[in-house]
Image (cartoon, helix red, strand yellow):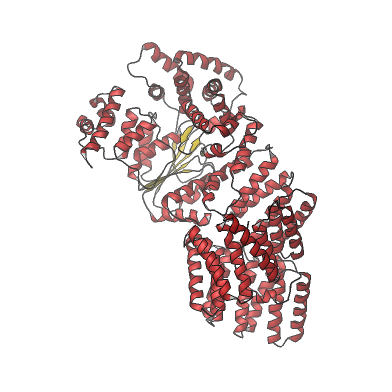
Amino acid sequence: MNASLFDFFGNRLKAYRQRSGLTQRQLAAELGVHRNTIGAWERGEYLPETKGMVLELARHLHLNEQEARSLLQAGLTALSPYWFVPYQRNVFFTGRDSLLQQLHENLRTHACLLCGMGGIGKTQLALEYAYRFFSEYTALFWLQAESEESLRASLLSVAELLDVGENQAQEAILDAVFNWLQVHPGWLLILDNVEDRTTVERFFSPDYHGTLLLTTRYQQLALPATRVQVEELTAEESFDFLRQRLGLKEPLPVSLHADIQALVRLMDGLPLALDQAAGYISEAHCSLRSYLYLLRTRLIPLLQDRSEGSSYPYSLVSTFELAFEKLQQRDPLAADFLLCCCWLVPDTIPVRLFREGTAYGRTSLRRFVDDASRIESVLETLEAYSLIRRNGSTFSIHRLVQAIVRTRSSAEWLACAVRLLEELFPRALSKQASWSWCDTLVPHVFQLTALPNLPEKTVFASLLLKCAHYLARRVRFEQAEALVQRALQIQQGGVTAISYTALAVLRWQRGRYTEAAQMVQQGLAAFQEENTVPAEELGVFAALLDGLGHMREAEAFYRRALAASPAESPALLNNFALHYYRRGRYDDAERLYRRAIRLYGRARQETDLVAPLNNLALVRIQQKAYSKAEMLLKHALHLRERLFGPDHPAISRVLKNLARCYQGQGRYTEAEEALLRALRVYERHYGPEHPELSRPLSGLAQLYVQQERYSEAEAFYERAQVVRQRALGSQDPALAELLIQQGQALVQQGRYSEAETLYERAQAIQQHALRPEHPDVMRLSVCFAYLYRLQGRQQEATALYERAQRIASRLELTSVDIYQLQEPGELFLQE
């Protein structure tokens, strides 16, 4: 590190010190270092040893955030790579030294809980602690703990920083973060705004060797932590805060000193109110005496009428109202912006929501559409009045300020917030790049669900369904179902039919086929009443009917969806072709797959092209045209690897089908390598207990059966059943399919009694979960018939085979053997 860089820091430090009016001796005394140290820094002889010391310099020199950042950069000091604090240090933080020291001592041995009323400064105290003592910890992470959703969002951000769990299911990502905490000692976790102890109980595990600092406004929160009460600022601390915040230098004129003391008395030691008062005085360029007059005229009516703002400190209500009225005069657009934002989660409001959104309706915010630069000026104005705090790509509003703003807001602004969220919440989730954006928006959606009588009901229902679709993709089925149920309550326009479909899909994904079938019946009635349902929703319903074995109805809905589509939809064609494939109509399936491939090729949609390529390959495998199938699958695999990389879960299902292709040709070693690779990818991204693992596990078991490696096959079948049952319960129809496959392997070995036991278990699941005419029921009937024939039970075998033929006839299958001959391939159903 050369001297010129040291000089750069020294020159900047000297300039800031001289501007503040401090001598080297005075600055050294405030920092607790020798005067010679300040001189050495300014002469460029060496740099401060820690970032904490540079931040202390910034605080004592009253630097703003930009100046503090520049001093840090000049000092070439960098944060630990394991630092996640979404807020800049508050350069105006004053006092609380004894409380910080108490906190520091307590945190050496115990978790600490900062308690106090809203606006008392708990978050700012925790923030100052983080910046002042960060060097004593191996890692420091700040988590928003107000709700389960906000905590999840924070943990996902930490996972991104730690580079753990990338592209995995969300639960696996969270587990990866907790595993990191278990392995690494010496960290500090700050859990801000804890509302419910159940949200944070997991962090108190004895397996962790780090430190916890929590903030809460609830005095009775039962947690194993040392309670530290945060009281109002003393008169002296309040005085120092206002003096520094207003940039006033000692000695002060007697009259000014008296005015500050008068303001301190009115503010009741509440830091948030003090900050807003100082923000108003600075931005409005008014004198302290003028502000006191305005404040007193505002405060008297509040004291006379306790109903107005009675749940909030009077000092805060009065300072806010003055600030808001001045804001309306100076920048009405900024005031309106605040009225809209107050309905969102206050901690992390993304600027992108307003920068990219256009659904402002007739509100004044529609100006952002034509001039996005206005957003920045609005944010700057609001921050100047201490009404928001900017944190890079997000901003926050204090909860008390948010609550008071809501008393001034209206349904029009709430509707605006709903429209913006619905507009910006992604519908298509094929690209995982959209997942982090969804994670940002999910807490805001749940915030809205807590509000009664929301406007824009149809738009809100659409938002709920989008969010539910995403949560289901991340295997958060219970939360997804709760959102769909809320959408069903709205029941306006085409939402009812779509909601029934979404709820049925969720039940189907969880293996609750009987309940899914009930939803389907309600959906059928709703679809008959609603004539304006989008083609894509009709297609989803058709696919659902197909999966539940309602094949005739499915075909009718596929045709209705194609007729309703304004342009030929390759996704619909792919799914319709899948329907024909399941019925053994391979020529019809091939015709539709080829049309889908042509359409995707023209549109250069390589991501979506994989589905029809993969599915057409399965047709070729059924036709035993293995070389053609291999060519299609290798093309699909190449596209997936090029788009997502060689270790992404998106390639695993293609690998399983490629293994089937190799298996059909007797190329067992290549088949095993493909399946093991698919298994490793799934384990890496989903963890060892995810139900998706049953796919490559069952594939390996089938391969080993074909090679007569029966003991290995049995072990893989049993593991596949365990992960499936743990995740989705003992009544999962896919578990029945695994039992059938293992039963067939036992039949092949002549172990008829054991095979019959497995078939009976599968039958019990099907009777609970499937309709009597489902294709899987037919498949099991054929398996039973074959087993009974081998056992010499001809009468029972004939009866079951005839039953299977009746089901095949009703389903219009080309042959009763279609489901017996078709090994379950990895079919790609498209959204």
Report if residue 647 is visible in the image: yes
Residue 283 lies left or right of residue 317; in this view the side is left
Quadrant hosting residue 579: bottom right
How many labels were placed on the picture? 0
Question: On screen, 93 above or below 794?
Answer: above
Position of residue 146 in the picture relative to residue 210 (left or right): right
Residue at the spot 51% in from the left edge and 74% down from the top edge: 671
State the residue lying farthest toward the top: 255
x, y percentage for residue 591? Answer: 68, 66
In the displayed structure image, the side of residue 463 where residue 684 appears, left or right: left
Q: Is residue 493 above or below residue 515?
A: above
Q: Position of residue 490 (x, y in %)?
A: 72, 44
Say whether residue 652 is visible: no
- In x, y percent, where is residue 226? 43, 42
Residue in the picture at 77% in, 51% down: 526
| Residue at image coords 45%, 48% | 158
Residue 30 location (% of width, % of height): 28, 28
Location of the N terminus (image quadrant)? top left
Q: Using the image as rendered, state which of residue 680 and residue 80 is in the foreground.
A: 680
Q: Nearer the viewer, residue 784 or 7?
A: 7
Q: Residue furthest bottom?
A: 792
Q: Is residue 79 left or right of residue 411?
A: left
Which of the pair 778/53 is nearer the observer?
778
Work out which quarter of the rendered image holds the C terminus and state it.
bottom right
Give above or below for 23 relative to 796: above
